[in-house]
Image (spheres, rainbow, N blue to C red):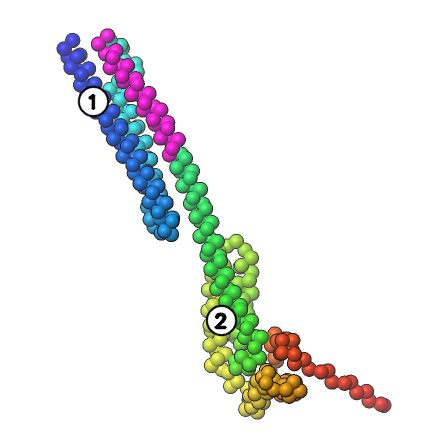
Amino acid sequence: MDASGDLHRASSTITAWLEWGFWIGVSGGAIAAAAGVIMAAMGRRAGDGHVARRGTGLIIRGVFSAIAFSGVVGAAQWILDPPARAPSPAAEPAESGGNGFADLLLWGGLALAGLAAAVLAGWAGWRARRRHTVKRRRQQALERSHDAVAAAYGAYLADVLEWLERPALSDVSVPETAVLVQALAAADDARLGNDVEAYQRAVAVLRTAWQAADDHARRTGLRQLPRVERRAAEQARKLLAMALNSSCGEHERRSAYAKARDLLDGILVVPPQAVATMEDKHRLALIPKPFRSQDR
């Protein structure tokens, strides 16, 4: 009887320590999870992704630490007080307390498991939303870069004076310009798809092609033309500058524009965007020459 009583007292002492351990473990996990919530909220508010991720990790570790601790304590309690043990009068009070503690472990574990599931579901939703946000921001940044190149090329094609400074940039027979035109088309196609990685590669190729074609055209200028044609193009550029000068009279401007077009005819092909700008925006449309019939 004395040995049985000593064993019962030792079991009761261990059970009491387990109860304290249970509450300490669960409280520590809850405190860690609460600190993680605060850290994640502060990180998101400050726009610091690293801090937000650390807070999320702390939430997960805190919840699972509490669950693991309650599981270990529950297993130890089950070993010390198995349900199939024969009842004894001396152990009845302890069994009553042990069963209450076992119920606490059961319901506490279920509650923590539900909390963990909710946290994981929220974390998974947050991760999915974050991935979508990051993807959208990358897409928008790539579109801005794409639009910048397209706008720069469009502005060049619409400015007749800029075009005459480096006409090779509009000549698709020039290899660098051909690569640029192909890169523009490829970036346009990639923009319509859902593959951000493919679009990023296409935009990178486009930016490289634009830089290479522009540098080549600036270095070349009008030097690819024979001497006589180069002089005609330079004279046409002066006439076009006069045609765009609003301080000159309308007749003088139209005459300068017509002479410039005649000089460039057969030498360089003026981009249609530049023609539209000159004739629509600056009102320099050429008057069609009258048709003269010949009597036979």
Q: Secondary structure at mark 1?
A: helix
Q: Which residues are magenta?
A: 89-116
Residue at the image point whose x is 56% and y is 65% from the top: 185
- The residue to which callout 1 is attached is 14
Characterize the local packing of mark 2: few (<14), some (14-19) or many (20 or more) Cα atoms within 10 angstroms: many
* Distance between mark 2 and mark 1 Cα atoms: 77 Å
In this rendering, the answer to whether 29 lies above or below 136 is: above
Question: What's under tag 1, amino acid-wise?
Answer: Ile
Characterize the local packing of mark 1: few (<14), some (14-19) or many (20 or more) Cα atoms within 10 angstroms: some
Extreme residue in the left direction: 2
The quarter in which the C terminus is drawn is: bottom right
Q: Nearer the viewer, mark 2 or mark 1?
A: 1
- The residue to which callout 2 is attached is 210
Viewer can see residue 236: no
Q: Which mark is residue 87?
A: none
In this rendering, the answer to whether 29 lies above or below 129 is: above
| Image-based side of 90 in relation to 146, left or right | left
